[in-house]
Image (cartoon, grey):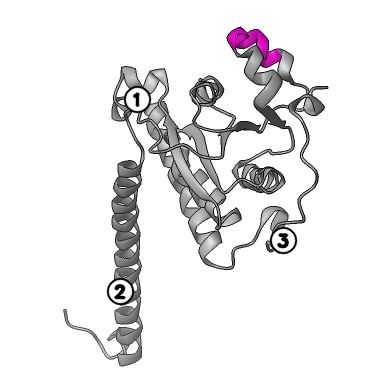
Amino acid sequence: MIYSTETRPSDAARERALRTRWRWRAVKLAVLAVVVAGSVGFVWFLSKVLSTVEKPSRTADGIVVLTGGSSRVSDALELLAAGYGQRLLISGVHPASGYGEIQRTLPESQALLACCVDLDRSAVNTRSNATETRRWAAERGFRSLIVVTSNYHMPRAIVELSHAMPDIELVPFAVIGDKWREEPWWTSGAALRLLLSEYVKYLFAEMRVAFGGVGQGGRPDVGIQPPAPAKPATAFAN
């Protein structure tokens, strides 16, 4: 192309255009790197999500089940009945719920509920599950816990619980839902969305713990408070 003196691009204009092209290339490479890293990380996350039920590798002092998924509580009660722990904490129970609702759903568990089960109605998410579990374990003097939650939720639960209780041994027991057994997750759009959502939450939990370790409610963890006297299970039944 032949430019007249008036229309020929100046050296400065050519340099600006070149810088703009390089910026766009850098942005594209950065986006590609993020996509690749995210994809690799998601595959790694999937490798941590169990697809088959595996019994706990050992017994523990106590058992904690995080509410929110089907059959979590019933599976936790089965572990308690089998002697895998001395007591069970059901964390994240609705404030209006109590032992009566659980008994109606699982009538065969009445004896266990009367002797060996505590309810936590304060927790509203996984972080507060960890806070309340830490308090309960300290009150009971427990040094090891079996953690019961859904398979897709287990990686994040272990991150939060191990951060809140670094001195307590955690033994995972992943609950596999019926839908998970019936069809592969990659054939279900709902299952894929659930896994992607949980993966993002897991990454945020890992980053929060790694960079500063801010505790529940935005405040740094300052250690476990002195344990209060242990309460019997019936003290929670209102």
- Please name whichever residue, 158 or 113, is drawn nearer the observer in this view of the structure: 113
Q: Position of residue 72 (x, y in %)?
A: 52, 25
Which of pointers 1 and 3 lies earlier in the amino acid sequence? Answer: 1
Q: Position of residue 185 (x, y in %)?
A: 33, 28
Which of pointers 3 and 2 lies earlier in the amino acid sequence? Answer: 2
Q: Nearer the viewer, mark 1 or mark 2?
A: 1
**Dot 2 corresponds to which residue?**
21
Looking at the rendering, the stretch of residues picked out in magenta corresponds to 101-108
Query: In the image, what residue occupies the spot 45% across and 42% down?
Result: 171
Q: Which mark is residue 85?
A: none
Mark 2 secondary-structure assignment: helix
Work out how far the residue at label 1 is from the one at label 3, CA to CA, in angstroms: 39 Å
Which residue is at the far left?
Answer: 1
Q: Main secondary structure of the magenta part?
A: helix
Residue type for callout 1: Ser
Residue type for callout 3: Arg
Quarter of the image that includes the C terminus: top right
**Dot 1 corresponds to which residue?**
188
Q: Nearer the viewer, mark 3 or mark 2?
A: 3
Mark 1 secondary-structure assignment: loop
- Please determine whether, in this image, residue 49 is positioned above or below residue 204: above
Residue type for callout 2: Arg
- Please determine whether, in this image, residue 18 is positioned above or below residue 24: below
Q: Is residue 154 left or right of residue 217?
A: left
Labels 3 & 2 near each other (Cβ < 8 A): no
Q: Is residue 97 left or right of residue 129?
A: right
Work out how far the residue at label 1 is from the one at label 2, CA to CA, in angstroms: 41 Å
